[in-house]
Image (cartoon, rainbow, N blue to C red):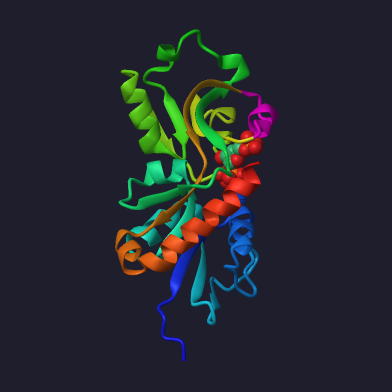
């Protein structure tokens, strides 16, 4: 019987899921039935001693920080917002997007400072707060969990701080970017203790992934 400890990998539901499983598949890390649609939340490959867990995007850093997952894939934006103590091993390059502030086209004000003391709807209140403070602006933050663009459309807030990937959502909701706050890509993160205890396997996985990423970036 194989007694080697399992490596547990936290994968986020949503845009990064398929990109992540495709990448792992290229280094032979996979498991039967690993699909975003799976109702089973832990998918195990006994032979390879791998466990994949499927989690809500914002929860990936938590699973990794506590060591419930050894490694995880998540966007830089979510890591920054979480403030969790995890170690970033690799910039995976995919999942490119940026975090920005936007307002309705017809409600643009001349300067950024003109929005001081207004309401911002966002999934990223910590990053937003950091940014506006750095601009000397006090704001009121309204935390939403999705469909952030609704905020200014229905008068909940003056602006949003949210992720833009293709720009389609902004366009379709008549919103316009005012200022870019940070760029983000997907990262491979690891629990600090797991990295020491399972160093050999994790390190060789990183080496393999680097090879795969080099090829896919050509
Ligand atoms: C994200 C983000 C925007 C959209 C941007 O939402 O919050 O709404 O994607 O992408 P685009 O620039 O390509 O249009 P997501 O689809 O993750 O869902 P959510 O609204 O539930 O957060």
* Residue found at the far top of this picture: 110
Residue 170 seen from this side: yes
Quadrant in which ligand 1 is drawn? top right
Image position of 154 (left or right of 81): right
Q: Nearer the viewer, residue 72 or 127?
A: 72
Magenta stretch? Answer: 166-175
Q: Quadrant of the C terminus?
A: top right
Q: Nearer the viewer, residue 174 or 135?
A: 135
Q: Residue at x 39, y 41 (%)?
A: 80
Q: Quadrant of residue 115?
A: top left
Residue 68 seen from this side: no
Q: Nearer the viewer, residue 79 or 193?
A: 193
Residue 4 in percent (x, y) is at 41, 81
Image position of 54 (left or right of 218): left
How many labels were placed on the picture?
Answer: 0
Image position of 86 (left or right of 91): left
Q: Quadrant of residue 154?
A: top right
Q: Residue at x 39, y 37 (%)?
A: 125
The answer to whether residue 185 is above or below residue 212 is above
Q: Residue at x 64, y 58 (%)?
A: 22
Residue 28 in percent (x, y) is at 60, 67
Residue 93 in percent (x, y) is at 55, 43
Residue 38 in percent (x, y) is at 63, 69
The answer to whether residue 41 is above or below residue 151 is below
Q: Quadrant of residue 24?
A: bottom right
The magenta stretch spans residue 105: no
């Amino acid at each position: 019987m194989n007694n080697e400890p399992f490596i547990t990998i936290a994968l986020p539901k949503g845009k990064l899921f398929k990109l992540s499983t495709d990448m792992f598949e290229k280094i032979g890390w996979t498991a039967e039935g690993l699909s975003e649609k799976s109702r089973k939340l832990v998918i195990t490959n006994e032979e390879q001693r791998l466990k994949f867990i499927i989690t809500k995007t914002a929860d990936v850093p938590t699973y990794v920080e506590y060591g419930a997952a050894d490694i995880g894939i998540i966007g830089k934006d979510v890591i920054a917002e979480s403030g969790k103590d995890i170690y970033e091993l690799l910039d995976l390059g995919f999942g490119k997007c940026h975090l920005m502030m936007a307002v309705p086209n017809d409600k643009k004000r001349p300067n950024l400072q003109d929005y001081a003391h207004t309401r911002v709807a966002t999934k990223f209140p910590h990053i937003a707060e950091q940014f506006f403070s750095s601009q000397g602006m006090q704001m009121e933050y309204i935390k939403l969990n999705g469909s952030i663009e609704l905020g200014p459309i229905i008068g909940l807030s003056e602006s949003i701080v949210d992720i833009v990937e293709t720009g389609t959502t902004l366009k379709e909701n008549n919103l316009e970017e005012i200022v870019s706050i940070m760029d983000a890509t997907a990262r491979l993160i690891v629990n600090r203790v797991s990295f020491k205890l399972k160093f050999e396997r994790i390190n060789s996985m990183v080496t393999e992934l680097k090879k795969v990423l080099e090829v896919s970036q050509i």
